[in-house]
Amino acid sequence: MTLRLGDTAPDFQAESTIGPIRFHEWAGDSWTVLFSHPRDFTPVCTTELGYVARLAPEFARRGVKAIGLSIDPVDSHRGWMADIKETQGHEPNFPIVADPQRTVANLYGMMHPAHDEVYTVRTVFVIDPKKTLRLFLTYPQTTGRNFDEILRVIDSLQLTDGYRVATPVNWKQGDDCVIVPSLQDPEEIKKRFPGGNDDQDAAQSAPPSPAPAPSSGPSPSPPPAVPP
Ligand code: BEZ
């Protein structure tokens, strides 16, 4: 099955480091980042999982749960978690799915046989609380991912879900965003963005920046604007 943005993230049941998991039930009302790595105890994967563990407060303040996956068994994952703690200074505080039969890997298109017939590539799926797929990225096995970028996309998704705005190139929380092109009516723009907007570019009117990024709290707080 080819997954596309907007599809429902497939549910699955699997063994994991926190015991058997039913994915949708485990995700509950949270956003989820599901990511695969090729193998346990490999150097790049080790840095990635250590970094995701270090990002736990950033995930928590956005209401996001992380969950890793590889085809190695749970016992291996448990031994590896201790190794990650020792070498990276942070023990994974999120479950790691064991997928020796590649059931989940095949469901989510994590096997790319022309790249590697045996092990998963590096995929990342961002899934919203309605279980809708909102982002996916696929990296080669030799390239570690940038999880700060994943957080940046989640910030954009959580902001743009609430207001008729989009985020421009290299946007980060607190920067200006743009009014969606479909919103052209000046009266409605005034109503939705009562603080005014910078109108230099007719195609991409820049509304006032959403409120500066909160240093804590569950999600970005946009300015006083009228939700869609
Ligand atoms: C690694 O995690 O270090 C790795 C895994 C597969 C291929 C290359 C590197």
Image: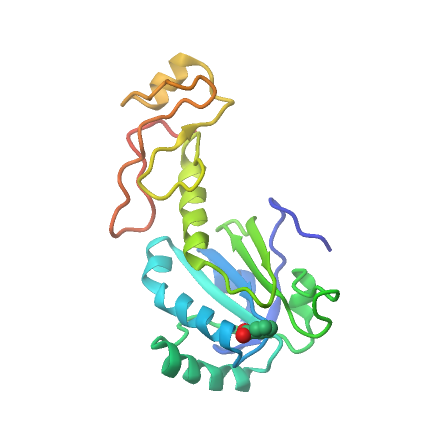
Between residue 42 and residue 191, name the one nearer to us: 42
Q: Quadrant of the C terminus?
A: top left
Q: Quadrant of the N terminus?
A: bottom right
Q: Is residue 97 visible?
A: no
Quick one: which residue is furthest to the front in this view? Answer: 142
Q: Is residue 208 above or below residue 55?
A: above
Q: Is residue 211 above or below residue 124?
A: above
Residue 167 position, x and y percent, is 43, 36
Q: Is residue 140 above or below residue 39?
A: above
Picture residue at 31% right of the left edge, 28% below the top? 208
Residue 183 position, x and y percent, is 47, 21
Picture residue at 28% right of the left edge, 29% below the top? 224
Residue 27 position, x and y percent, is 49, 60
Picture residue at 44% right of the left edge, 52% below the top? 149
Between residue 147 and residue 68, name the one nearer to us: 147
Between residue 31 and residue 113, name the one nearer to us: 113
Residue 207 position, x and y percent, is 35, 26
Q: Quadrant of residue 185?
A: top left
Q: Is residue 77 left or right of residue 119?
A: left
